[in-house]
Amino acid sequence: MTFSPELEARFEKLLKSYPPGRQRSALIPMLMYAQDEVGCVSDELIDEVAKRIGVTTLVVNEVMSYYSMLHRKPLGKYHVQVCTNISCLLNDGDKLYEHACKKLGVSHKGVTPDGTFSLEEVECMGACSWAPAIQVNYDFHHFVTPEKLDQLLDGLKDGSPGGARNGSPGGSRKNGSPGDPGRK
Amino acid sequence: MLYNEPSPLETRVLSRLFGLPNSASIDTYLANQGYEAFRKAAGMTPEKIIEEMKISNLRGRGGAGFPTGMKWSFVPRTSAKPKYIVVNADESEPGTCKDRVLIENDPHQLIEGVLIAGLAVDAHAGYIYVRGEYRYLIEILDKAIAEAYEKGFLGKNIQGTGFDFELYTHTGAGAYECGEESALLESLEGKRGIPRIRPPFPAVAGAFQCPTVLNNVETYCAVPAIIRDGGAAFAALGIPKAGGTKMTCLTGHINKPGVYELKLGFPVKQMIEEVGGGIRMGHKLKAFIPGGSSCPVLTAAEVEGATMDYDSMGSRKSMLGSGGVIIMDDHTCMVKAALRIMKFYAHESCGWCIPCREGTTWLKKILERFHHGEGTRADINLIGDISRNMLGRTFCPLGDAAAMPTLSIVEKFRGEFEDHLNGKPCPYEHEMVTA
């Protein structure tokens, strides 16, 4: 399996980050970073990671199935994650999630037919003071209203760069800046 | 980047550089006494560093509140095996978003805290375990770590002190359980995040079965100030037996939600009214969770006269926890709140211990039924029974974390459960509106 030079460099660094004989530690980070490039944790990727760290594919399968951010099937180009946990719920995160379901025409873990969007109702993402919050790929969006969500998703559909996978820190910082009106 | 306006009532120790231009850069850090505490600690004996930590009365900021100096002192002085420093940046306790702010705005403070921990226990490598969702923070940390290597604050013979230290980031992949220290260590070793039986504790057999110091981000971030200004100065900020400040996340039905650095012992009433600008839409307080969804819920009457610290919350049979304050106004359906909290724990239970794995799912089903108006009077007691049978019967605190808020809600808001009986729709549902 071939990867981009950046990912190969990341793998090399990861494999050197742990004590001798402890390369298995790189298993989860390797899958996480590779998933961004490959699109999901494919059979081929499992074989490749198993080979590189010297464990069986069974071990990789067993470990990865525990973690909710590792996906066996491809997500949409933009993975929309709506938090409905307690602090978001108190700020109508559940209603925002329902709105997202209607807007995208899919439900929990569904992918739109054109593959542009996927949707997930997620647990607390660490944006509790700026609720309700969503993440599109790795980018946070705070104080999201149904109107703001529509605007964001329409923009992404039209090819706005705001939420590209592997979103740069710049992408993240744009959201919820002090200029954000927030709550009254 | 700050996501909320600071409050004049804050005491800025860990957040002292927040808001400065490029506060995350090493140049800004160095221009503001950055790494001075490391230099000072390098001239101290390990015993003296640990002594200073004990004087500071710093208690673990992840939620358990264990005294940090004592935790460090459990690491054996001499060891044939290498020792490690591990940072728990797997912030995922519902209501908590403070470590994110600390890393984003001042990553070098964390790195310096880790280095001082390394000096204190003679460790030469460390790992920052960051939850997978915080990818942008990993990028910020990787950049800060690269800057520190470049300026000689990481690597071999740091600043000519003869001390070597290597530091790495490690991403998680979505699992609340990995915030529990022994599950985190399993995950760091490339395994499923299930808890280990203790003893041995991480201080003796932690990362890679070697002696390990494992603390929360905020705990390490407090270390440079303690060494720089002295443990006594830090202790004086708080209350007896619990020193310093607490990064406090105001969430829920509050006018000015945000992360604020408040002295330990800060009055709850003043925190809600003055720091947080009061309850939304002029409503009244119904329920208060001091530090993340694992803490027992307090009623408005119970928080009268309470202060934000371990003792005040402990005496009310709750906990200071992680500092994730969840405020619920009098328009909140407590059955719905209990259901959402339980849905979370049922999703996150790792399945290792049966009382937790089965208990959380049963409770979720009962609460779901209840909220849809299909509950029975017997269910109310059943919720209590199942919760009590989970308490103290699991390897890690997740079972307790699920049981405690549920028990407290059923006991303190029983009337609301009764209101849901007899096939009626949730009597509060239509009122769940936001301004």
Image: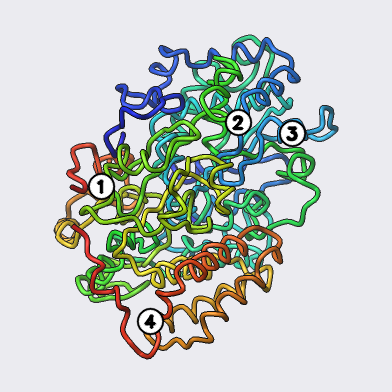
Residue B32 placement: quadrant: top left
Pinpoint the chain carrying mark 3: B
Tag 3, which secondary structure?
Answer: loop
Quadrant for the C terminus of chain B, please: bottom left
* Residue B420 numbered tag: 4
Tell me how the rendering is colored: rainbow
Tag 1, which secondary structure?
Answer: loop
Q: Count residues near mark 2 (Cα–Cα under 10 Å), then give few for <14, some for 14-19, many for 20+.
A: many
Kind of residue indicated by mark 1: Asn
Dot placed on the residue nearer the N-terminal end, 1 or 2:
2
Q: CA distance from mark 3 to mark 2?
A: 22 Å
Q: Which residue is mark 1?
A: B255
Q: Is residue A11 visible?
A: no
Q: Which residue is mark 3?
A: B83
Between circles 1 and 4, the one closer to the viewer is 4
Q: Do marks 1 and 4 share a subunit?
A: yes
